[in-house]
Image (cartoon, rainbow, N blue to C red):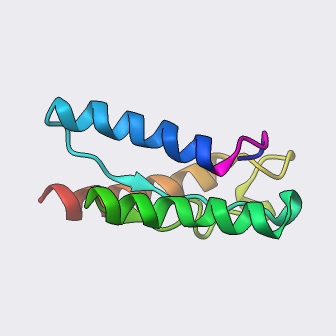
Amino acid sequence: MLRGISPEETKKNLEGIINIAQTKDIKVMIAGMIAPSSHGADYKKAFDEIYPTISKEYNIPLIPFLLEGVALKPEYNLSDGMHPNKEGTLIISKTLEKNIKEYFN
């Protein structure tokens, strides 16, 4: 997303991964992302729709936004403002843990 890969290509790549996993009977969960507005409103809209659409099309659980509570919060990110620091990673891991436990139990 930050490299400007088209939403169509991103969706196609994710679908390929999901198809491979599902043919091997591997349970799949998708963790959504939200595009920044820096690529324009059309790109953002198309990108933001990828994860909910895939979740519905493939009937797989969705974490709407993996970085919820971390993104845009300086105290949870490295100085680059994009990557989570130790504290941010802990928040993300708790989000994953909660969702994985719900899905696999």
Q: Main secondary structure of the magenta part?
A: loop
Query: In the image, is 96 to the left or to the right of 51?
Result: left
Query: In the image, is 32 to the left or to the right of 37?
Result: left
Q: Is residue 87 above or below residue 19?
A: below
Identify which residue is drawn at 72% across, 46% down: 83
Query: In the image, is 35 to the left or to the right of 62?
Result: right
Q: Is residue 41 above or below residue 17?
A: below
Query: In the image, is 11 to the left or to the right of 100?
Result: right
Q: Position of residue 75 (x, y in %)?
A: 76, 62
Q: Is residue 72 visible?
A: no
The number of discs equals: 0
Viewer-side residue, 91 vs 10:
10
Viewer-side residue, 69 vs 45:
45
Whether the magenta-drawn stretch holds residue 58 is answered as no
Q: Position of residue 24 (x, y in %)?
A: 17, 29
Q: Is residue 24 above or below residue 86?
A: above
Q: Position of residue 15 (x, y in %)?
A: 41, 42
Image quadrant occupied by the C terminus:
bottom left
Q: Which residues are magenta?
A: 3-7
Identify which residue is drawn at 29% across, 30% down: 20
Q: Quadrant of residue 47?
A: bottom right
Identify which residue is drawn at 56% across, 66% down: 49
Q: Is residue 30 visible?
A: yes
Q: Position of residue 101 (x, y in %)?
A: 22, 59
Q: Is residue 23 above or below residue 82?
A: above
Viewer-side residue, 69 vs 28:
28
Identify which residue is drawn at 25% across, 61% down: 59
Q: Quadrant of residue 72?
A: bottom right
